[in-house]
Image (cartoon, grey):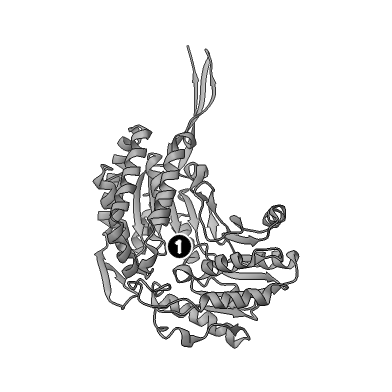
């Protein structure tokens, strides 16, 4: 059996790879666990330098990587790939590693040494998504390796070359092949390995249904799982917001990468005094976009990663229009619309009875509603099964923080959106998942505390 990457550019098979049999997967797990004990004995400074060198090796490949990403998942080459964010996240985690993993010394007297150390879990399985295939993977891969774990990376079938690039880069600088393994596994084998306690920690980024499958497979094993699942992230524009900045940032947050962003903006609430101006400016922004082949430097919106994703967004949009929503973007401006190529759309006259305002769309469409005050906005922002980020627009920081305290979300932004700060914990609530990546907390989730109570003499 094989996994196939069907390119959204033209529907061709761009890459095909054989999957591991169960016996081959078991052998890979065994090699990783043996190698991990030696890896953990190496000084942390050495592990840090090796990971940083591997990151630099990815940077050296960027010219080849950018068109590969376009072919695999459709992002336009004009945006230059992901190395900026990839490097920022890995570098930050490398810089804080020694402090984040430092032992907590309670006592070192003539009678006792009492200390709490952070020790690696062992073998970490990273299941990474296709939408930001390098940045989402490195969030866990870099700190897991630095902390002394072995890592097996199972990348999305839409982006199979990403795991191969990471393996090539890390191995080229001296990270042992058994310590970082890129593997191609089907769902059944993955679930069986989890159920048989092959892994000591699992980090999964993907759909809610995928997260449910992970938890079911791990039931009764006590294996730790970090989950980042769906999102329906809101923006709220208050009467004292910088309107031009709010429009520019929120619409970009809704449309960039064809709307396929984990923390993309999927619904916007605007105070009624600014609503008409916000819509007018937002439509003007979207009307300037160019939908087309992502290999064309002029293209600003490429195809969605797969035709079935585009069809789901079409279905949500058409249902909303049928139920009374108003579409503001003229299809005549986007003649290439069709198949995986999906034109952007702005909808008003939407309600929370519509799927477009409740279910994850993960595409270039956004519903916008007028609100009377903060109370109404808070109620609507919290009326969701998801909780990843929320974007608040005002010139009053105390007001923003007060509202943020009342929103069920993992991250609250003020006057920005769709950004992952590696110094802050990347986390969510409700159906968005559990756990936390990056920051010092990311290291805590990739290790376990171990206490030493040593009596002298």
Q: Nearer the viewer, residue 2 or 417?
A: 417
Relative to 93, is 434 above or below? Answer: below
Residue carrying label 1: 206
Tell me residue 178's x, y (percent). Answer: 27, 45
Q: Is residue 66 shown left or right of residue 106?
A: left
Q: Is residue 201 visible?
A: no
Q: Position of residue 71 (x, y in %)?
A: 31, 70
**What residue appears at the point 31 percent right and 78 percent down from the top-left corner?**
11
Q: Position of residue 15 (x, y in %)?
A: 26, 68
Q: Residue at x 68, y 60 (%)?
A: 394
Residue at 38% x, 78% y is 292
Q: Nearer the viewer, residue 51 or 204?
A: 51
Q: Horizontal and vertical percent for residue 175?
A: 28, 43
Task: Quadrant for residue 306, please give it.
Answer: bottom left
Q: Under tag 1, what secondary structure?
A: loop
Give the answer, above or below, for where 243 lies relative to 163: below
Q: Nearer the viewer, residue 410 or 247?
A: 247
**Quarter of the rendering occupied by the N terminus:** bottom left
Query: From this viewpoint, is residue 188 visible?
Result: yes
């Amino acid at each position: 059996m094989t996994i196939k990457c069907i390119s959204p550019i033209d529907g061709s098979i761009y890459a095909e790879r054989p999957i591991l049999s169960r016996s081959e997967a078991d052998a890979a797990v065994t090699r990783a666990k043996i190698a991990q004990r030696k890896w953990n004995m190496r000084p942390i400074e050495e592990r840090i330098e090796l990971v940083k060198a591997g990151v630099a090796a990815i940077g050296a490949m960027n010219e080849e990587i950018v068109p590969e990403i376009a072919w695999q998942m459709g992002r336009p080459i004009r945006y230059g790939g992901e190395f900026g964010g990839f490097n920022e996240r890995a570098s930050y985690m490398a810089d804080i590693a020694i402090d984040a993993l430092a032992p907590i010394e309670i006592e070192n007297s003539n009678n006792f040494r009492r200390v709490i150390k952070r020790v690696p879990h062992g073998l970490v399985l990273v299941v990474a998504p296709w939408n930001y295939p390098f940045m989402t993977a490195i969030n866990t891969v870099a700190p897991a390796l630095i902390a002394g774990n072995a890592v097996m990376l199972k990348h999305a079938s839409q982006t199979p070359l990403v795991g191969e690039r990471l393996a090539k880069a890390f191995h080229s600088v001296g990270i042992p092949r058994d310590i970082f393994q890129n593997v191609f596994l089907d769902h059944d084998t993955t679930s069986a390995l989890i159920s048989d306690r092959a892994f000591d920690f699992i980090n999964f980024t993907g759909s809610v249904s995928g997260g449910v499958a992970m938890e079911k497979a791990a039931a009764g094993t006590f294996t730790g799982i970090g989950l980042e699942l769906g999102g329906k992230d809101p923006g709220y524009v208050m009467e004292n917001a910088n309107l031009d900045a709010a429009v520019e940032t929120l619409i970009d947050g809704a449309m960039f990468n064809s709307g396929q962003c984990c923390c993309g903006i999927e619904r916007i609430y605007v105070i009624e005094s600014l609503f008409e101006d916000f819509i007018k400016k937002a439509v003007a922004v979207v009307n300037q976009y160019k939908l087309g082949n992502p290999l064309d430097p002029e293209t600003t919106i490429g195809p969605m990663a797969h035709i079935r994703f585009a069809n789901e967004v079409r279905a949500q949009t058409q249902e909303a229009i049928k139920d009374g929503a108003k579409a503001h973007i003229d299809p005549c401006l986007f003649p290439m619309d069709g198949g995986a190529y999906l034109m952007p759309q702005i909808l008003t006259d939407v309600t929370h009875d519509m799927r477009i305002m409740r279910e994850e769309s993960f595409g270039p469409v956004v519903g916008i509603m007028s609100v009377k005050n903060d109370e109404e906005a808070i109620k609507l922002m919290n009326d969701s099964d998801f909780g990843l980020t929320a974007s608040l627009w005002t010139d009053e920081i105390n007001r923003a923080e007060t509202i943020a305290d009342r929103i069920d979300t993992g991250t609250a932004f003020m006057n920005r959106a769709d950004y992952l700060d590696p110094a802050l914990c990347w986390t969510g609530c409700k159906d968005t998942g559990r756990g936390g990546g990056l920051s010092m907390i990311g290291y805590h989730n990739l290790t376990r505390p171990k206490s030493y109570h040593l009596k002298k003499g």
